[in-house]
Image (tube, rainbow, N blue to C red):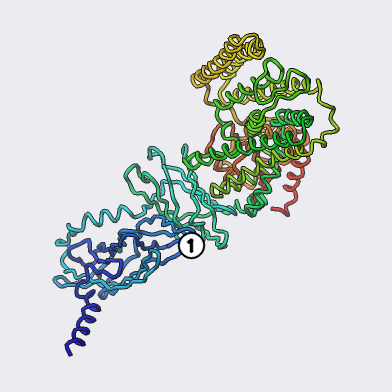
Amino acid sequence: MRRPLFVYISIFLTVFSTIAFANPVRVGQVEVALLSETEQITAGKPFGSAIHFKIDDGWHLYWKNPGDAGAPPSIEWQLPDGFTAGEIQWPYPHRIDLPPLTDFGYDKELTLLVEITPPSNLPVSRNVELRATIDWLVCKEICIPGETEVRLELPTGSSNLSASNSANHAFFASAREKLPIENEDWEIQALMTENELLLSIGKPNWVEGKLQSVLFFPEERGIIVNPARQIFQASGERQTLRIPRDKNVHLTPERLKGILVAEPGWRGPGSERALKINIPIDYTGIAVVAKGEISGIWMALLFAFLGGMILNLMPCVLPVLSLKVLGIVSQAEQGRRKSLWHGSIFAAGVIASFLVLAGILLILQAGGNSLGWGFQLQSPAFVFVLASFLFLFALNLMGLFEIGPVSFGRKAGVSHHTSVQSFLNGVTATVVATPCTAPFMGSALGYSLSQPPLAALLIFAFLGAGMAFPYIVLSAFPQLLRFLPKPGRWMVILKHFMGFLLLGTVVWLASVLNLQAGGSAVVILLLVFLILALAAWIKGQWGSIPLTGTRTFLAATAFVFLITFGVTIGLYALDKFAETEITRAGTAPGGLVWENYSAERLAQLRNEGRPVLIDFTAAWCLSCQVNKRVALENDDVVKRLAELNLALMRADWTRRDDNITYALAQYGRNSVPLYVLYTGKDSLPQFLPEILTPQVVLDALAQIEDRSII
């Protein structure tokens, strides 16, 4: 009889121990306690209570949105008559990565604050018992449900005797620091595109410094891809958070609810790290991106490949690649195998350059910079160096000296290409290609923004592969060039001519520098050109002809020194004397006025029901400038724009501008040119192609009269 009695006593103690000894209670991997912020309860006066969990190492509990799996804790109160319990106040969670899933939750400890309100007629000098049944799911490699009941008995008293529980004061203060704050001074906008959720964050004037990192936790499941990397770009007054959208769940909520967790704090360093948001979602980007025709990674890769091939026809890259064709012509004489080898090395140079460029772009974006395709050309220093490089390259092509990635032999028609030169040809072609954007490129590059780094790099690799593909084909089948004359002096003459085309590119870059940094910068550039020309002349006179080893060495040393000195002193002077303000918008042919782009002005024009055409452009974007001259300033187009009383806006991306970067992202793009047409007040934005003709623009404008599309 003694053994059954012992068992019954054990069961009794196990079941009722949580009642007899409510604080704390251990169940499995979790210890739970109920605490009060006050030592006694006062009639009608709310007080704080807390359910505190201690969690064993390696285990975790869940936030109210648990992420890809799990379930949040729940509380069922059993309170005396007249008492009411408020909503659970959830502290901000952290990501718990369990590939391929990501959960939102807590480890080590969790405190759920709940405000309890006693009735106004509560008598004094009595004890009141608070009881709550707690359920949870605690997980590690496995998940174990848990449940217990906690109790707390508190005396009642008059308002004069009500006081905070000094023992728990620090505990509650610490718990409240982890609650998200509500601060409407922060200007936050949400845009949902087909592929991603974009959050634009504008800080109030009273906040100094800038956010270093931000993570978004949605209250609702199925909004974002939880395991995906959230890209935070912080620079200037406006910051952007990009999050891939969960396309497996077709949710279109009107408002976005959740919290933003940021370093170092939303009210300055050391302040609260979580900000609660409940904002409307703008879905206007969906139609735009859908029109971008990218529905998946395979289509993005196809678009990137096609865009890369077409990029060869863009005016910025054509002179360099024409020289590559001449190289293939000369190499064809040396056999198909060697020709194919150099074609492959050239392709490797192109693809490697695109990957390096994409890697830098992704790293800078991850570091909080708002950048896009051609970002390096937004820097006057880069334009300065690129112009200097192309100037030297042009002198090389024109025969002033012989060195560099493209070098035909002194014997007419004989190529002296090495593998290194073929690789550098690919690098050079990529560098000079960056000011241009070809059809299909914009959609592919815009899509890459919402993808993980590996997928984004793959898209850039396909862009490079597309650009190199025609040369691989020509290298493999050099007989395709049989319509060209045999190698001979004509190739040298053509090479000299290409030098003049490159000088034209240099003049264009100088004009870009003028817009970016002013006339003083152009003067500095011309002075550097003088030094570079002297270096090239010395190299051509004494560096290429081995009169003596010493003379050649001295010539090479002088060549390197003058180039280094010229570019270094030029960059120093540029930094010292560059102007910072540029003129962006203004009048155009026909008396048309292009306003500077602003989101506020666009919203105003759309509310007025006025059609709007937005030109996203940059001075360094050669495609943009050609479109402007050929199409937008065409007489028939100008006349039609005036007749329609179209509001014209120009978003100039010549220099870095976070507002324009964000606007591009809203349309699912990160490159220029981009032409957006709103035909009326409630119309969806319409895309025009990257390559414009007058007829393309006129056809698009005809839609304004055809209200069927509105």
> For mark 1, does the 10 Å Cα neighbourhood hold few (<14), some (14 to 19), or many (20 or more) residues?
some
Quadrant in which the N terminus appears: bottom left
Is 67 or 64 nearer to us in this picture? Answer: 67
Q: Quadrant of residue 537?
A: top right
> Left of 48 or right of it: where is 489?
right
Which residue is tagged 1? Answer: 221
Q: How many marks?
A: 1
Q: Nearer the viewer, residue 611 or 443?
A: 443
- Residue 56 versus residue 363 in the image, above or below: below
Q: Is residue 240 above or below residue 130?
A: above
Determine if residue 590 is in view. Answer: no
Amino acid type, callout 1: Arg
Looking at the image, residue 404 lies above or below residue 118: above
Tell me the residue at 55%/63% (across/down). Answer: 249
Residue 154 percent coordinates (x, y): 18, 69
Q: Is residue 697 left or right of residue 273?
A: right
- The location of residue 301, given as percent across then percent down, is 65, 48
Is residue 354 something one can see in this rendering? yes
- Relative to 673, is 98 on the left or the right? left
